[in-house]
Amino acid sequence: MARRTGYASLPLHSGRAPAWLFQRMVRLSREILTFLAAEHGVEEVLRRLADPFWFQAFGCVLGFDWHSSGVTTTVCGAVKEGLKGLDRELGLYAAGGKGATSRKTPHEVTAACERLGRDPGSLIYASRMAAKVDSAAVQDGYQLYHHAFFFTAAGEWAVVQQGMNDASGRARRYHWLSPNVTSFVEEPHDAVCCDVRAEGLNLVARESAGARDGCAQLAARPPEETLALVSKVPSLALPSRHALLPGFDVSGRHLQSILLETYERPPANFEALLGREGVGPRTVRALALASELVFGTPVSTRDPARFAFAHGGKDGIPYPVDRQTYDRTIQVLSQALNRASVDRSEKVQAFKRLGRFASPGPGPREDG
């Protein structure tokens, strides 16, 4: 798995990839992933999609803006489109996407599983929990707007999803890989990529275990007791993390209805609480802060981002380049390009982009 690999600023860009470019991205991504699946197996394809360094290089080779937040949505869209018609042959499927398309993920997973003759339940649960964690259990200032779910016929999966921060104009990408997820609510990510670090509410941090238990306990109490505790939170002289939780105000009626439901059917643990319909960021935040008040279990403010977006770092800022991973990425993509059955001119341009990505200069230029 890639480690700290370098740095690139990924500004939010508006607009869409032009049709001529996207069509070529679809063809080239299909050829590269077909080669990887044939040579290394579909599980390796998932692993690479979950590797933020490889994913960024992949987007560069396909021809999208190397530094744009749109690389996430456009590359995932090209891969999804490229797998159509090949998914059953490869045993590799893609669901979800940007905005409203992300909400179709359960339907798309179910449709694929019906053809496979397998129960879609565990895959739908994994997709839903990954989205719930990154929208409610990790409150880092980024609003999710893209969710791509890749899975194999054998049931392994990877998630690539992204959030945006309108105030800073930056994006944050979250990578998940099923073999590395031993718990959905304790350090579940394969990587969280962002070039901006800040404190927030991180209930999936290992050190937040007490707070998670406290949330589940409070959710099982009579609603009036928990609401009374929540009402005291805003006036407390809490540590700086309180000031870092914008929009704390919670609709009393909404929270009361949620707490009544959790009181009547107490959640077994925090994961069960998080998975409940209607339990969102504000409910989780209210319970977490009330838990600190009652049980003295502070929520971690450690930023879950462990990777800067993948490029540069030749001067060691913010991290030294992982040369072994870097070289391996270039080698694998070069092999895939050599085997790709696409127009020669497209292949030549892809090699040029890969060459610029691999150059020791200040960074690749925008291409396309």
Image (tube, grey):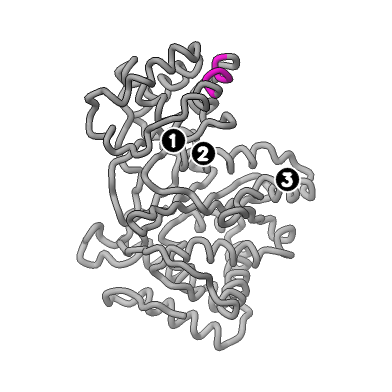
| Residue stretch in magenta | 258-263
Instruction: Please name the residue that numbered disc 2 is placed on.
Output: 132
- Is disc 2 in contact with disc 1, using a CB cutoff of under 8 Å? yes
- Tell which circle, 1 or 3, labels the residue nearer the N-terminal end: 3
Q: On residue 137, which mark appears?
A: 1
Q: Is residue 305 above or below residue 56?
A: above
Q: In which quarter of the image is residue 295?
A: top left
Q: In this view, does 145 lie to the left or right of 19?
A: left
Task: Categorize mark 1 by other alpha carbons within 10 Å: few (<14), some (14-19), many (20+).
Answer: many
Q: Quadrant of residue 240?
A: top left
Q: How many labels does the image show?
A: 3
Q: Is residue 127 left or right of residue 108?
A: left
Instruction: Please name the residue that numbered disc 3 is placed on.
Output: 110
- Is disc 1 in contact with disc 3, using a CB cutoff of under 8 Å? no
- Tell which circle, 2 or 1, labels the residue nearer the N-terminal end: 2
User: Label 1 to label 3, Cα distance in Å?
Assistant: 26 Å
